[in-house]
Image (spheres, rainbow, N blue to C red):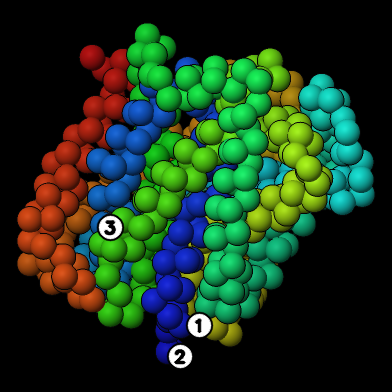
Amino acid sequence: MSQREQWSSKLGFILAAAGSAIGLGAIWKFPYIAGQNGGGAFFLIFILFTLVLGLPLLLAEFTIGRTAQDNAVNSYRKIAPGTRWHWVGILGMITSFILLSFYSVIGGWIIVYLVKAIAGDLNNLTVDQYAEVFNGTISDPVVSVLVQLLFILMTIIVISGGVQKGIERVSSFMMPALFVLFMILVVRAVTLDGAMDGIRFLLLPDFSKVTSQTILEAMGQSFFTLSVGVSVMVTYSSYLPKTQSLPRAAFSIVGMNIFIVLLAGLAIFPAVFSFGLEPGAGPVLLFNVLPTVFSQLPFGMLFFIAFLVLFLFAALTSAFSMLEIIVSVASNGEPSKRKKWAWIIGLAIFVCGVPSALSYGVLGDVIIFGKTIFDLADYTVSNVLLPIGALLITLFVSMKMKRSALWEELQRGSRVKRGLFEAWFFLVRYVCPVLILAVMMDVLGVW
Ligand code: PFF
């Protein structure tokens, strides 16, 4: 077998892992889920879960990947040979497959808006007109499937070219630019008339709105935004040289992620309240609100186009990681097979994702367990598969990896303190599994 690919620089890995984490989860999903779950209390619980569960899990996945230096399935095999733990990797591949099948629908929506904004179709419309244009477009079966395909094709092309070239290049300029644009957007949003109501909605917790469902969704959201529970981060850290500090990478990714979630909330909710929209509008929320905020800025449409390009990159860098985990297992690290598998798997995901794309139009009436096909796929991934994957990963680390080996791996390239290590190990071994199980059982009404 030829030599494994590695990231070309320390920054390359952080950018790629942050690129996987920061995507639709923080920018599109967080505002609409928070909107449906009462705002502030959801935000607070989400932050707590991110720190107590997401951060330790991210570090756990990094440690597994760099210890084993192999793909998501073989990493578990190498560390625990002769056991069934590699099913954690297989579960991750299945999760990733379903995830990309609906993620690409939203990626497609970004492309729709981009084309419309460039064509000048979005100039000077009212809030209601934006919603009308958008909802009209996504209910068109041909358009929604075509743009979904386009998004998947972009993902396939980058992944068939290999991890390094594709991912590092795109991520390195995207992230800083996205931060800057978001700041501009937030300044505009919080100075709108009536913005205070939106800020209050996001930052003042109202615990009367919290149910077991809210808690489960906040947990699922914290896994989703950090890309944990799928073994994607196992895969990415397996390309990592031993000189990189894993704790530092984990802290910076969590920090960036929380920051962008906050920016997204501060950009959306003040506008929602100022324009008299419904915070619980669901997946279309961001797409209905944002163009109106941009249209209130000088050169608004130009800013909007720049934002959409960056937003598309953010979504793509997350999509890359979803396809990468499956392709790296299928091609077993052999560069000559990468291209073939990227196309086969990518197109299979597209075919399976078509019903999700159509659930805002012709398949809108198909309701399973009270949800549209799109919502069902999203719910299953975020609130069932990610927590199960996360639970298994914490069990794997605490049962199958030696404490001394973990300590050694985490010290490579880092001057991590023993106390910090012990705190992390305690969280992974006891707090994470118990908390994840408790939240899931609570929803199932076990007590
Ligand atoms: N973290 C990505 C986002 O917030 O958009 C979504 C994601 C990517 C989740 C990869 C899980 C994953 F394995």
Q: Is mark 2 within 8 Å of ligand 1?
A: no
Disc 1 secondary structure class: loop
The image quadrant that residue 354 belongs to is top right
Q: Position of residue 303 (x, y in %)?
A: 74, 49
253 or 165, nearer to the observer: 253
Q: Position of residue 98 (x, y in %)?
A: 56, 46
Q: Which residue is mark 2?
A: 2
Q: Amino acid at mark 2?
A: Ser
The residues tagged by marks 1 and 3 sit, at their Cα atoms, a distance apart of 27 Å
165 or 363, nearer to the observer: 165
* Image label count: 3
Label 3 crowd (10 A; few <14 / some 14-19 / many >=20)? many
Q: Kindly tell me whether residue 139 is visible in this rendering.
A: no
Marks 1/2 in contact by CB < 8 Å: the verdict is: yes
Q: Amino acid at mark 3?
A: Leu
Q: Nearer the viewer, mark 1 or mark 3?
A: 3
Q: Position of residue 322 (x, y in %)?
A: 53, 57
Label 1 crowd (10 A; few <14 / some 14-19 / many >=20)? some
Q: Which residue is mark 1?
A: 334
Q: Position of residue 105 (x, y in %)?
A: 69, 44
The image quadrant that residue 47 belongs to is top left
The circle drawn on residue 59 is 3
Q: Residue at x 58, y 85 (%)?
A: 336
Residue 418 to residue 424: above or below: below
Residue 445 to residue 323: above or below: above
Q: Residue at x 43, y 52 (%)?
A: 256
The residues tagged by marks 1 and 2 sit, at their Cα atoms, a distance apart of 7 Å
Disc 3 secondary structure class: helix
Q: Residue at x 29, y 27 (%)?
A: 439
Q: Of marks 1 and 3, which one's residue comes earlier in the chain?
A: 3
Disc 2 secondary structure class: loop
The image quadrant where one finds the C terminus is: top left
